[in-house]
Image (cartoon, helix red, strand yellow):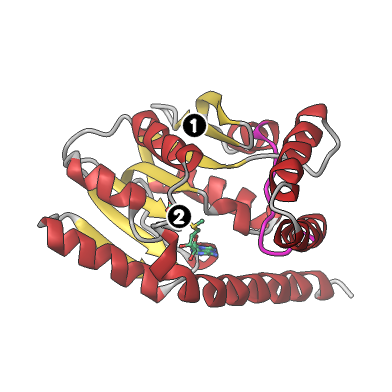
Amino acid sequence: MASERPRTEKLGRDLSIHTQRRKWQSRADTWDRHNDVGMSKVASMAVEAAKVRPGADCVDLGCGGGRLALALAREGANVLGVDVSESMIRRMEAQAAEEGLHSVRGMVAPIEHLELPAASLDLVVTNYALHHLLDGEKEKVVRAAAQWLRPGGRLVVADLMLGRGAAARDREIIASKVRVMARKGLPGYWRIAKNAFRFLLRIHERPITPEAWVALFEAAGFTEVESVPVVAEAAIVSGVKPLGG
Ligand SMILES: C[S@@+](CC[C@H](N)C(=O)[O-])C[C@H]1O[C@@H](n2cnc3c(N)ncnc32)[C@H](O)[C@@H]1O
């Protein structure tokens, strides 16, 4: 019985990685065109929150086509972009080559399996990716980031951050999304049904609240933990690995 839990956890994690890989392999060509104002705002605020210096060593988790990784490289950082989708990584590499950005590398790997040397990074950043992970994996990634960072290094998580309706903020966000979709008529109602199913069963999308992220950061020993709301459903949580850590 004692061995059942790790086995079930592994199965859940493998299934989640498999579904994310399938989903994002097929969306690589269209994702970067999905440039709504809110998302662009979150990405540019995440780059600001990263406070990156030229020569800094960074990893972008779930980098996709490189929205953040490329922006950081343009500021002179060395960036490893990690993504479960090979086509996303190829897109990022092609764009880096086109711009002559030689400090960007791609790695096709699930975040859940990522192993990096201890104290080898100045920044761990991620944009709209960690809400795809199971909750236990989110916690492990925050702890792992604390290991990968050098003292004084920074973790920045920009993401969809909301709960499943327990708080008034969640209910307001959900209601406003439903109103926007409903205005689109029949296709909108279909999206409402599909998204409600996924959201309630936590299939693909598994966001947690900004408060839950802050708690994960603090439990992993980060200091100067800050949560900044950006648009209704998205926020940025950042923290610093203490100098003595
Ligand atoms: C919503 S897109 C965001 C991409 C990029 N960060 C951006 O800002 O445009 C989510 C990305 O996370 C990646 N992803 C999802 N689950 C992952 C996992 N378990 N490991 C690595 N990457 C993952 C997907 O392949 C996809 O590229």
> Tag 2 or tag 1, which sits nearer the N-term?
2
Which residue is drawn at the image coordinates 81% and 35% (left, top)?
171
- The numbered disc on residue 238 is 1
Which residue is drawn at the image coordinates 26% and 43% (left, top)?
72
Q: Is residue 219 left or right of residue 121?
A: right
Q: Nearer the viewer, residue 178 or 3?
A: 178
Please name the predominant secondary structure of the magenta segment in the image: loop
At mark 2, the secondary structure is loop
x and y, in percent, of residue 9 in the image? 74, 69
x and y, in percent, of residue 2 in the image? 85, 71
Q: Label 1 is placed on what type of residue?
A: Ser
At mark 1, the secondary structure is strand
Q: Is residue 186 magenta?
A: no
Q: Label 2 is placed on what type of residue?
A: His
Image height of 244 relative to 191, above or below: above
The C terminus - image quarter: top left
Q: Is residue 129 left or right of residue 29?
A: right
x and y, in percent, of residue 172 in the image? 77, 32
Magenta residues span 201-210
Is ligand 1 within 8 Å of the beta carbon of the residue shown at mark 2? no
Q: Is residue 235 left or right of residue 197?
A: left
x and y, in percent, of residue 159 in the image? 55, 43
Q: Residue 52: tell me if it is visible.
A: yes
Q: Residue 108: tell me if it is visible.
A: no
Q: Is residue 33 left or right of residue 223?
A: left
**Are dots 1 and 2 in contact, CB under 8 Å?**
no
- The numbered disc on residue 34 is 2
Q: Nearer the viewer, residue 218 or 85?
A: 85
Q: Is residue 202 magenta?
A: yes
Which residue is drawn at the image coordinates 30% and 72% (left, top)?
90
- Which residue appears farthest toward the right when viewing the image? 1
